[in-house]
Image (cartoon, rainbow, N blue to C red):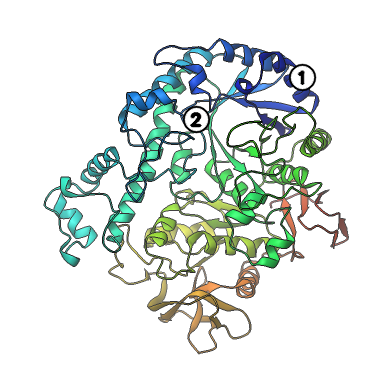
Amino acid sequence: MTPELGVCYYPEHWPQSMWAEDAAHMVEAGLRWVRVGEFSWSRMEPEPGRLTFDWLDQAIETLGAAGLKVVLGTPTATPPRWMLDRHPDMLAVDENGQPRKFGSRRHYCFSHPGYIDECVRIARIMGERYGRNPHVAAWQIDNEYGCHDTTVSYSAPARQAFRRWLAERYGSVEALNAAWGNVFWSMEYGDFDQIDLPNLTVTEPNPAHVLAFRRFSSDQVVAFNRAQVQALRPLTDAPLLHNYMGRILDFDHFEVGADLDIATWDSYPIGFLSDRLEADAAHKAAFLQQGDPDMQAFHHDLYRAVGRGRWWVMEQQPGPVNWAPYNPAPLPGMVRLWSLEAVAHGAEVVSYFRWRQAPFAQEQMHAGLLTPNNQPAPGLAEARQTAEDLAALGPLEPVQARVAILFDYPSDWAWATQPQGAGFNYFRLVFSAYRALRRAGLSVDVVPASGLDDADYDLILAPGLATLDDALADRLRAAAKLTVLGPRTGAITADFQIPAQGRPGLQALNCDVALVESLPPEITRPVQGGGAARHWVERLTGDAPDLLTFEGGTSALKGTDQLWYLAGFPDEDLWDRIVEMAAQKVGLTLHPMPPGLRRRETATHDVLINYNAHSVEWNGHSIAACDVAITRRNPPGRG
């Protein structure tokens, strides 16, 4: 089907007399979807048990009558004030033991059973009322899990739930003591009820304890989401979705997504450039008003995997945001570019946040498609142009890429627990590999470790995969002609111990990590022939052939026919060498890209995306500044 555009709308913010005109203007602008309801619990239920849905009934009818398809959100990210009177201990608690007070949003703890029951109750009430409404074409559950550091809670309900989780996982406290190595520093427990949460300790807590708590916290998000899914499923045939965020890794999105029909995410490229990306000053200056050329694409590919092929952008930045350290406006053309880039990666819907800028409260500085006084904002014209582009272009069918990145949330939890070096960060490592593939002009899939069974790739990059056993290594070998592992791959067990067989300890790869060291930012370890490792370096032993060598004579890359192991965190030059070597080995054609220009293949077209503030010439194509060129590929084929 042809991709469509949408917008986020808050009818409760505006007089009812404006709704029909707003809906007509949305349709005129080429928008087909509208999200409502996700923050409006106090208007749905101003007092416990007193339901006031007449306004929402009318809003849905007005929007639907205009031809818009409604995404209806459950309002559980914003529990009303009376909820706190009913459940005083429902607040999340931070690492310092301070409650996250009422007065904004997301102030609940995922482990509070009373609040979970309230969420199931309101979801069921909404499902019974709107589940068969012809205008409600999708449901969003909650909003932005993990936003504002709210996944992990150190509350009393979380402590009780964690103890139950540990008892189910380990069976006996003796098994837990052995798995965690609690003989160290006399940390052994005599009963599960003695186990506290891993905060406010004198020095760092046991990393096994922390990792277990991170796994538990992720499981609580999964269970919270599942409770609402189970309430809604019998009441509606419309798809269920959630809007994830950029670079939020503290719960396993694949596990949450397994219960949903569509993955969506909220894309704010300029905000992410300054707030969530490590880059030098020159890079940030060059892309100040465009966003990083790879950040959005990475998340598009990630959430396509989370949604098992079905994904949307639920919130697309249309102008300056309000929450980053600095908030410049997008350059002309960028709102359209971001939208078309998402479509090139397979998005079914791109929805803008928001229709009209709010004149009050926390987000009054966040731009919309209209100004607060109802004038067109710059993003509106670009949204309208994008709608025209999509109508003229028709469907862009996605296609499996020939290369993939293996992404693993528990690996991020592990290395955040014990980084060993300030420069070592799982996301940075994986993202650096993704960037290298994109610089080579390759389309990229993202896959979880659980998604390899039917995979068929030429190349998989799996850096930093914390836990790796022979069974997973065999699945990687079956899934790709070549897999590049390391650094820090296979370094711990699921309980944060060094594997008995050593690191990475694979039968199929005679390569052992004898020593690891982390480096300060100004220090690198050059590799013979070009490139260097930074942040993290390992000393390798074993009979696997050396493919690259550090200038000091130790192995930088060892490998066999199907598995390579990388002994450091590569800089850009070293990643480019490795990608070129791997491509030669598996017969993969590279398309080196100039800075700021990126390429995405669909089943029939090449999409060239120019993030630069200047035009670029490449392979006979001239791509204007902040523009997209879509060309038919002949013959069409696999991406």
Mark before the other along the chain sequence, 1 or 2 = 1
Q: Secondary structure at mark 2?
A: loop
Q: Nearer the viewer, residue 27 or 132?
A: 27
Q: Please say if 593 is above or below 67.
A: below
Q: Please say if 235 is above or below 356.
A: above
- Horizontal arrangement in the rendering, residue 172 relative to residue 443 (left or right): left
Q: Residue furthest left?
A: 190
Give the residue drawn at x 53%, y 32%: 241
For the residues labelled 1 and 2, say whether their Cβ atoms are less than 8 Å apart: no
Amino acid type, label 2 = Ile
- Horizontal arrangement in the rendering, residue 89 relative to residue 388 (left or right): left
Q: Nearer the viewer, residue 448 or 471?
A: 448
Spot occupied by residue 82 in the image (x, y as percentages of width and height): 39, 22
Q: Secondary structure at mark 1?
A: helix
Give the residue drawn at x 72%, y 30%: 372
Q: Quadrant of the N terminus?
A: top right
Q: Nearer the viewer, residue 349 or 633?
A: 349
Q: Residues within 10 Å of mark 2 (few under 14, many from 20)?
A: many
Write down the quadrant of residue 457 in the picture.
Answer: bottom right
Q: Please say if 194 is above or below 421.
A: above
Amino acid type, label 1 = Ala
Image disc number at residue 141: 2
Q: Residues within 10 Å of mark 1 (few under 14, many from 20)?
A: some
Q: Nearer the viewer, mark 1 or mark 2?
A: 1
On the image, numbered disc 1 is attached to which residue?
A: 24
Spot occupied by residue 61 in the image (x, y as percentages of width and height): 64, 12
Give the residue drawn at x 36%, y 41%: 99
Image disc number at residue 152: none
